Image (tube, grey):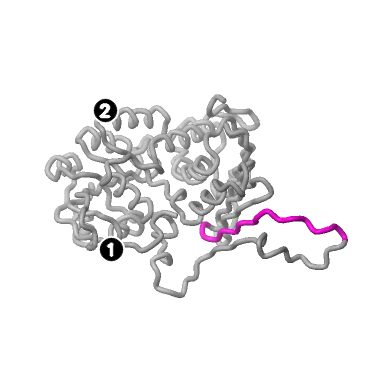
Amino acid sequence: MENVYPMKYNFEFDDKLKVCFIGAGGHSFRNVYPTFQYAPVDLAAICDVDGERAAAYARQFGARASYTDYREMLEKEKPDAVFIVTAYHPDGRVQATDIALDALKAGVHVWMEKPTAASAAEVRQLMQASQEHNRFVMTGLKKVFFPAIAKVKEIISSPEFGTPSSIYVRYPQSMPELSRRADLRNLTGLLDHIYHPGAVLHYLMGKIGTMSYQREPFSGGSVTTFRFLSGAVGTLHMTAGSSVSSPLERVEVIGGGCNVVADNGVKVTYYRKASLPPYGRAASYLVDDQAAPLHWEPEFSLGQLYNKNIFYLGYVPEVLHFCESVLAGKPPRKGTLEDSLEIVKLFEAYRCTPEGETAVINES
């Protein structure tokens, strides 16, 4: 497992990245800026179109300067890397896509919050710019940095689990009817959130070959079936209409006589290979200790770092992965543009494919 312990605090790092931050919104205030307490980051400057907010964030998080023009900031500060957490253009496109292209041209590594872009063509444009300017781009695909999902990946990659044969992902998301999906402005909700289950599906099972879905007209929920290039199959249940007081997410992967479940993003249960007792003769449901299920879930009583949501929701692990990759001169292994490309291919399939028809995401 990555970045488990012992964790370092910011002041304990000998080598740090000079970093600038573009965006001063509520999400970044809660979830991204606070990660810098545990990362090798020297926050030089913050930029936002609202100058007062940029200055307030600079005071709050210890940046030495604030700007309202990110191009001016990049020119004057010459950072090693930039963090981008912004919103959408009026036409529904992702603001961060264009900003990331400018940052790459300025010779700066990029960490950007999802969504990376609204089209596969734009992701490929970022891939080309990243290669041309020899700078890394990483997207904050936090789900694949959840300790729970990272544990699922570790389990399904073990020889004893066998070949992952099927997956079920539950995620509370609606989708407008097909006639409204041509206008990107109607799809910012789906675009913003498909990166979460899409990242989990790709990380755990690899590339999707084909997909087909059915949508219900009451809340906009849907059920999608997948065939992965590996031959495995899967289901994405987008549970629009479910109660917000219920656990929101569930992931289950089936292997060869084994299965593993991640519930609500924090609870992991590994059902190991066991022998079925004689039917009609078994007096106990308890299996041998060597085959008993393994279960992990956090306690929330101690003042441990893992009890902070920026840890169990993957924010600190993803920021650390980016910083460590840049400092080592090695491209990130997770949250890559290749990962984002596969997710946006899925988004485009939802955007264009009628219910019941099969869309080809990748040729086998």
Name the image quarter holding residue 243.
bottom right
The percent coordinates of residue 345 (x first, y second) are: 48, 32
Residue situated furthest right in the rendering: 280
Residue pointed to by mark 1: 9
Neighbor class of circle 1 (other Cα within 10 Å; few <14, some 14-19, many 20+) is few
Q: Could you tell whether 110 is left or right of 42 in the image?
A: right
The percent coordinates of residue 319 (x first, y second) are: 33, 51
Q: What kind of residue is marked 2?
A: Glu
Name the image quarter holding residue 166.
top right
Residue pointed to by mark 2: 132
Name the N-terminal-most of marks 2 and 1: 1
Q: Main secondary structure of the magenta part?
A: loop
How many marks overall?
A: 2
The percent coordinates of residue 325 (x first, y second) are: 31, 45
State the SS at label 1: loop
Chain part drawn in magenta: 265-280
State the SS at label 2: helix
The percent coordinates of residue 188 (x first, y second) are: 44, 41
Which quadrant is the N terminus positioned in? bottom left
Q: What kind of residue is marked 1?
A: Tyr
Name the image quarter holding residue 290.
bottom right
